[in-house]
Image (spheres, grey):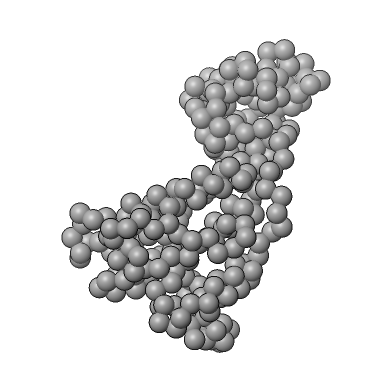
Amino acid sequence: MFRRHLIFYLIRICKPHHLITLISLLMSVVGTQTVFAQQQIALDTYAIFQQSCLICHGPDGAYKESLLMEHNALIEKGSVVPGNPEASELYKRLITTETAKRMPLGQPQLPAQSINTIRNWILAGAPDWAVTSTTNGDFISPSEVLNTIETHLMSLTPFDRAFARYFTMTHLYNAGESAQILQEYRKALYKLINSLSWGVTVTNPQPIDSQGTIFYIDLRHYEWDRNDGWTKIEAEYPYHISFDAPTQTALKAQLTR
């Protein structure tokens, strides 16, 4: 699909010829990080518990008195310390090299991927798998995102369109993040953009959809239009979507007319 979907970093102290490479590197790090939706990581973790732990530590398990795989019980008894896997007895029992102490007892060690999922769950604050998502809106499809961007782009003057760029966090909305968490992401975006601005006026990205997941910026507000900087960043950005002329020419014509 034809769209510019970039998150970039501008470092004031860098020399110009080093800036693009550094920006590309930082964007690569950001691009490879997975944002775990609270509910999904909790459900993934519980699926592991169901398969490997509940037979002994479930409500009817023989060892439920020593360790009950119930969310509140894990937290209250200190088996899981939200945000701190290394301090969580459950996690330590999964990774110990002492087979007599390692869980599941008498069974092969859990796969590394499963252990990593549990670790990420704890790092995410050990959210409750029984809590349903508080974002109840309809799924926002990629085509809807592009249509919203196109509508907004066409509302600008032809001259202003060249300076329009868009950020999206629809993937977080679709993944079921709560309204509170989404607002925190918005604040983080606003702070990031303005802290890296070369301009003198604080200008927050402008939401353009009713859900507040697509944001418009004008490069000139942040002085990012100078010296063709954005184009250079696009050229270096490793996750850009290449233009497919046979299928996207018409869409490009619509978005850039």
In the displayed image of the protein, which residue is found farthest to the left?
15
- Judge whether 31 appears above or below 135 on screen: below
Q: Nearer the viewer, residue 168 or 208?
A: 208
- Give the percent coordinates (x, y) of residue 17: 20, 65
In the displayed image of the protein, which residue is found farthest to the top?
65
Q: Say whether residue 131 is left or right of residue 223.
A: right
Within the image, what quadrant is residue 147 found in? bottom right
- Judge whether 234 appears above or below 254 on screen: above
Circle count = 0
Q: Say whether residue 29 is left or right of residue 256.
A: left
Q: Residue at x 34, y 73 (%)?
A: 231
Q: Is residue 22 visible?
A: no
In the displayed image of the protein, which residue is found farthest to the right?
60
Q: Residue at x 21, y 57 (%)?
A: 14
- Give the percent coordinates (x, y) of residue 10: 30, 58
Q: Residue at x 73, y 16 (%)?
A: 64
- Give the percent coordinates (x, y) of residue 82: 55, 27
- Give the percent coordinates (x, y) of residue 192: 38, 51
Q: Is residue 176 visible?
A: yes
Q: Say whether residue 45 is left or right of residue 164.
A: right
Q: Residue at x 61, y 45 (%)?
A: 179
- The N terminus lies in quadrant: bottom right
